[in-house]
Image (cartoon, helix red, strand yellow):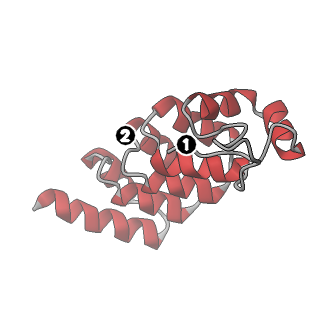
């Protein structure tokens, strides 16, 4: 199902395209962004909604990396970390995120390998450390 932005004429879309053209182009290419809906009407959601939808759904490392690099919202990083499709190389990037909730979500990810979870088990945050240790116990069983 395609997700839509408000309109090519909205200031938000113009600003997003000017500031992050690679990200907007990739979102558009993968069907997360469209200029209008199937009835030719201005869609309701915003570019931020489209980015967050891609963060939750996408399995494409290129798109996820673009979102991490270009759109630095903590909630979006958390959505990527919780995405069941997020590949290991992206999780490794997120393991160094400054938000403990993001690192804890990485530790809980089914795509995190043993060495990444072990690395997170020594985190300074108790939330991350406990999440990683619980996951290590799963590996050992």
Q: Residue at x 64, y 39 (%)?
A: 33
Q: x, y (%) of residue 120?
A: 39, 56
Q: x, y (%) of residue 104?
A: 44, 63
Q: Which residue occupies the foreground of this view, 55 or 45?
A: 45
- Mark number displayed over residue 72: none
- The quadrant of the picture occupied by the C terminus is bottom left
- Mark number displayed over residue 88: 2
Q: x, y (%) of residue 34?
A: 67, 37
Report the side of 108 relative to 136 (left or right).
right
Report the side of 7 relative to 110 (left or right).
right
Q: Nearer the viewer, mark 1 or mark 2?
A: 1
- Mark number displayed over residue 2: 1
Q: Residue furthest left?
A: 141
Q: Residue furthest front?
A: 39
Q: Earlier in the sequence, mark 1 or mark 2?
A: 1
Q: Residue at x 37, y 40 (%)?
A: 88
Mark 1 and mark 2: span between their CA atoms? 26 Å
Q: x, y (%) of residue 73?
A: 68, 54
Is any part of residue 138 visible from this angle?
yes
Helix, strand or loop at mark 1: loop
Vertical position of residue 109 compared to residue 91: above or below: below
Q: Residue at x 59, y 27 (%)?
A: 29
Is any part of residue 97 visible from this angle?
no
């Amino acid at each position: 199902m395609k997700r839509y932005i408000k309109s090519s004429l909205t200031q938000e879309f113009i600003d997003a395209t000017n500031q992050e053209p690679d990200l907007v182009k990739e979102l558009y290419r993968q069907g997360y962004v469209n200029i209008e809906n199937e009835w030719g009407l201005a869609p309701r959601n915003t570019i931020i909604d489209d980015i967050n939808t891609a963060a939750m759904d996408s399995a494409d490392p290129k798109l996820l990396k673009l979102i991490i690099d270009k759109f630095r919202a903590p909630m979006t990083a958390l959505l990527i970390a919780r995405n069941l499709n997020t590949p290991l190389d992206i999780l490794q990037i997120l393991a160094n995120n400054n938000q403990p909730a993001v690192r804890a979500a990485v530790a809980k990810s089914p795509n995190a390998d043993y060495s990444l979870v072990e690395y997170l088990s020594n985190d300074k945050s108790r939330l991350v450390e406990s999440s990683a240790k619980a996951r290590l116990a799963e590996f050992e069983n």
